[in-house]
Image: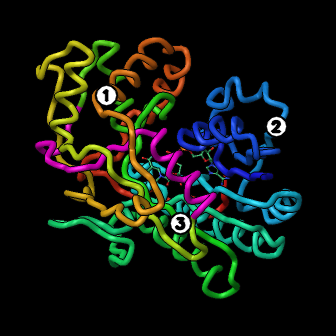
Amino acid sequence: MKLLVTGGAGFIGSHFVKGMLNAEDVERVTVMDALTYAGDRANLGEAFLSPKLAFVLGDICDRGLVDTLMAGHDAVVHFAAESHVDRSFQTAARFMTTNVLGTQTLADAAMRHGIERFVHVSTDEVYGPLTEGAATEEYPLRPTVPYASSKAASDLMALSYWHTYGAPVCVTRSSNNYGPRQHPEKIIPLFLTKLLRGGKVTLHDRGQHMRNWLHVADNCAGIELVLRQGGPGEIYNLGGGTDMTSRELTGELLRICGAGWDQVTYIPDRLSNDLRYAMDWGKIAALGYRPTRDFRAGLEETAAWYRANPDQWAPMSNSLPAAMPDTRSARPVLESHHAH
Ligand SMILES: NC(=O)c1ccc[n+]([C@@H]2O[C@H](COP(=O)([O-])OP(=O)(O)OC[C@H]3O[C@@H](n4cnc5c(N)ncnc54)[C@H](O)[C@@H]3O)[C@@H](O)[C@H]2O)c1
């Protein structure tokens, strides 16, 4: 298999690439990544030693480059995206450009080049909040924030290439991922890196938001299963991690870092914050998917990585915007529509 992986220098993409390089039937993995603030070659680390890996610095919205790269590959796994909800409150246009136009650009080239499998990586956030029950793949999409709306649009755009042209597109919708090498803007590494430096963490509202936490390795195993066995035009929910409120999650992180609740301050909720996500993942379970990572053990392993590698995350941590738009006073900023 000759695989093109977009966003392979990001958190989930880099874990996925490292796994696929070990697969015997994988002849080549080409990573295409624009190396935005979220991408880092260091995430691929030892993968660069593999003769199977090629790295191309480029934007998924660049039609010419995408077209050139698509030739010579038989499968695409598409991770590249603007991925942080809080940033989408301020720069929604960039989310639309990368997530929607970028996906359309890739799907279009994949169709023209007769790509045999196109896996689009989406999220449970496209379903929006559920007060009860769990969303199956048939559940309506009711995203509430710009990030999730752009992912819903890109997810449907990818599927439209199946419905319209018969392009063999599959979509995975996973819950919240965690694990080593996640950008320190996301809640688990944000809290870990602050607590490890003796700082305070801030919890939105009373920390009642419920999320499902899936180890990145389990998500990657599910994505590989869909790549190999998913049906064209099919959507697969990838859940099955641990459900927790952000307050419960904070308790776990405080315990691991040996810190107390006096390290926590409460702030007003962000502009929009879905109370609960929940997915039914029976469809992919029927293909043999089972998450295998224990949450507490996975969190300990994640904390151990951040403890051991401050040189890898400190520069990113230090360059986080001083005030992320996480209070009700935040307002969007004007931005140009150029990709990057
Ligand atoms: N992290 C999660 O919990 C989670 C959960 C469900 C779904 N997802 C989805 O999984 C995918 C990967 O998420 P992640 O957490 O690894 O994100 P990430 O932000 O860590 O990585 C995104 C990568 O995409 C690259 N990129 C951004 N814009 C690009 C562009 N225009 N052209 C080429 N490359 C570009 C970045 O440089 C980066 O390497 C995203 O599509 C995200 O929506 C993430």
Kindly state the secondary structure of the residue where label 2 is placed.
loop
**Sequence-earlier tag: 2 or 1:** 2
Mark 2 or 1: the one toward you:
2
Q: Secondary structure at mark 3?
A: strand
Q: Is residue 50 left or right of residue 269?
A: right
Q: Report the residue marked by disc 1.
A: 191
Q: Residue at x 32, y 33 (%)?
A: 294
Residue 178 is situated, as x and y percent measured from the top left of the image, at 40, 37
Residue wearing tag 3: 171
Is label 1 in a helix, a strand or a loop?
helix
State the separation of the CA atoms marked 1 and 3. 30 Å
Q: CA distance from mark 2 to mark 3?
A: 26 Å
**Residue type beneath disc 1:** Phe
- Is 84 left, or right, of 142 in this rendering? right
Above or below — where is 291 with respect to 18?
A: below
Q: Quadrant of residue 21?
A: top right
Residue named by callout 2? 52
- Say if the magenta span includes residue 217: yes
**Magenta highlight on residue 59:** no
Q: Locate residue 213: give its quadrant.
A: top left
- Tell me the kind of residue under disc 3: Val
Is the C-beta of the residue carrying label 1 under 8 Å from the nearest atom of ligand 1? no
Q: Which residues are magenta?
A: 202-229
Residue drawn at point x = 84 percent, y = 71 percent: 113
Circle 1/circle 3 CB separation < 8 Å: no
- The image shows residue 95, relative to residue 11, as above or below, that is below
